[in-house]
């Protein structure tokens, strides 16, 4: 758990997986202050290019023939480029070469990095997309202009090709690249946990990371289960923006977008999901109920449960008042295939944790059901 002031525990009982490498610590800290348990399972790693021969060659090329326009697509990319120039003794020459260039930013983070580097942004894309940058530049006219485009690890998103078609001389600068996941086994376990209800939310901050996460789910043959949990809102898949969300949407996965492409907005959309009624809830004999991977929220109060208790209650919750057999409930226990006696003991302990027997009803010779009064 991260140190710092603890805010209203809107995420208490939630387990949230962060499928990102860059700035994952900052995101985890903000979520943990709101009561969540987080873990980082990057779908891809970021490989810096400080020693990349191609990056140094492109930088030297721009120093010898300065650009008319510099397009900055990510703040971390521009900072990494300046750092790489420092490491190789080229920073002063690069600053001089860019001094008279027009700077175009793909969003506020890129804008901030431009200012931090000592330059001035002449135009900032409101939508934070490469498409808007391309529309602006082509409307202004780029024929015969030399344009340096700093990219993120996924490449140009078609921007370079568009500008070249319009007659520009484009120099592509890729400061970092996407590499394999730091821990492939952790990634595999994470997608399995998402499918089985052991994770309440998975957060994405890059399109390549989202695409690789989906491939991991396909390899584990559980994408269908994840799709069903996301469709029911039992699993929140949240993305920092529409570009990041595109692979998830293409895979027919229900996805929630942050209001703006910033980490703070991503945190707010997670908090809103679990505190505003967007997550499924049932009115039961024990009170209004919402499931969490670590237990249950009853009338706004979190009740922690054991893994067995959470598994049993989750099975009954998803049934929404229908009967679940002892065999079905046994499969929801941590050790699948438990005996009928183990199911009875798990139900008894669950009833005790929920304050009595009224919430879970025994249906003779059939199994158990949740005493649902009204679905909300």
Image (cartoon, rainbow, N blue to C red):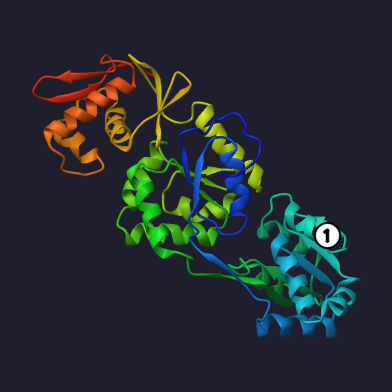
Residue under pointer 1: 116
> In this picture, is 350 found above or below 181?
above
| Residue 74 appears in view | no
Considering the image in quadrants, where does the C terminus appear?
top left
Q: Is residue 63 left or right of residue 338?
A: right
- Given residues 89 and 222, the one toward you in this image is 89
Residue 272 vertical placement versus 110 (above, below): above
Residue sitting at 79 percent across and 69 percent down?
Answer: 70
Q: Residue 120 vs residue 277: left or right? A: right
Q: Residue at x 53, y 28 (%)?
A: 275
In the rendered image, which quarter is residue 140 located in?
A: bottom right
**Residue 80 image offset from top left, x and y in percent:** 72, 69
What's the residue at 58%, 50% (across, down)? 242
Q: Is residue 272 visible?
A: yes
- Report the front residue among 229 and 295: 295
Residue 293 location, quadrant: top left
Question: Percent position (x, y) of residue 331?
Answer: 20, 40
Q: Where 47 falls versus 358 (above or below)?
A: below
Binning the other alpha carbons within 10 Å of mark 1 as few (below 14), some (14 to 19) or many (20 upward) gives few
The quarter in which the N terminus is drawn is top right
Residue 198 image offset from top left, x and y in percent: 37, 43
Q: Where residue 33 sits: x, y (%)? A: 60, 38
Q: Is residue 172 left or right of residue 274?
A: right
- Helix, strand, or loop for circle 1? helix
Q: Is residue 195 left or right of residue 174?
A: left
Q: Residue at x 55, y 38 (%)?
A: 270
């Amino acid at each position: 758990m991260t140190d710092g002031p603890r805010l209203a525990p809107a995420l208490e009982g939630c387990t949230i997986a962060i499928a990102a490498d860059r700035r994952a610590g900052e995101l985890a800290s903000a979520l943990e202050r709101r009561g969540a348990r987080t873990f980082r399972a990057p779908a891809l790693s970021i490989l810096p290019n400080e020693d990349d021969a191609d990056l140094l060659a492109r930088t030297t090329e721009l120093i010898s023939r300065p650009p008319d326009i510099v397009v900055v697509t990510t703040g971390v990319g521009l900072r990494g480029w300046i750092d790489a120039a420092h490491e190789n003794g080229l920073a002063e020459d690069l600053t001089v070469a860019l001094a008279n260039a027009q700077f175009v930013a793909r969003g506020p983070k890129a804008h901030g990095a431009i200012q931090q580097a000592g330059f001035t942004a002449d135009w900032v894309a409101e939508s934070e997309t490469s498409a808007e940058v391309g529309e602006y530049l082509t409307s202004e006219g780029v024929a015969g202009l030399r344009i340096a485009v700093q990219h993120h690890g996924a490449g140009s998103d078609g921007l370079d090709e568009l500008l070249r078609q319009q007659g520009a001389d484009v120099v592509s600068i890729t400061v970092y690249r996407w590499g394999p996941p730091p821990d492939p086994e952790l990634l595999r376990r994470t997608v399995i946990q998402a499918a089985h209800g052991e994770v309440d939310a998975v957060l994405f901050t890059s399109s390549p990371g989202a695409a690789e996460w989906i491939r991991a789910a396909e390899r584990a043959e559980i994408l269908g289960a994840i799709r069903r949990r996301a469709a029911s809102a039992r699993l929140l898949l949240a993305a920092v923006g529409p570009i990041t969300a595109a692979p998830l949407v293409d895979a027919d996965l229900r996805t929630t977008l942050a209001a703006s492409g910033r980490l703070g907005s991503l945190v707010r959309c997670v908090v809103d999901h679990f505190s505003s009624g967007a997550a499924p809830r049932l009115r039961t004999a024990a009170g209004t109920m919402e499931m969490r991977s670590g237990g249950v929220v009853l009338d706004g109060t979190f009740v922690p449960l054991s893994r067995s208790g959470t598994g049993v209650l989750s099975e009954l919750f998803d049934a929404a008042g229908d009967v679940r057999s002892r065999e079905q409930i046994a499969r929801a226990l941590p050790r699948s295939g438990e005996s009928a006696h183990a199911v009875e003991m798990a139900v008894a302990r669950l009833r005790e944790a929920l304050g009595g027997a009224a919430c879970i009803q025994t249906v003779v010779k059939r199994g158990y059901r949740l005493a649902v009064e009204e679905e909300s």
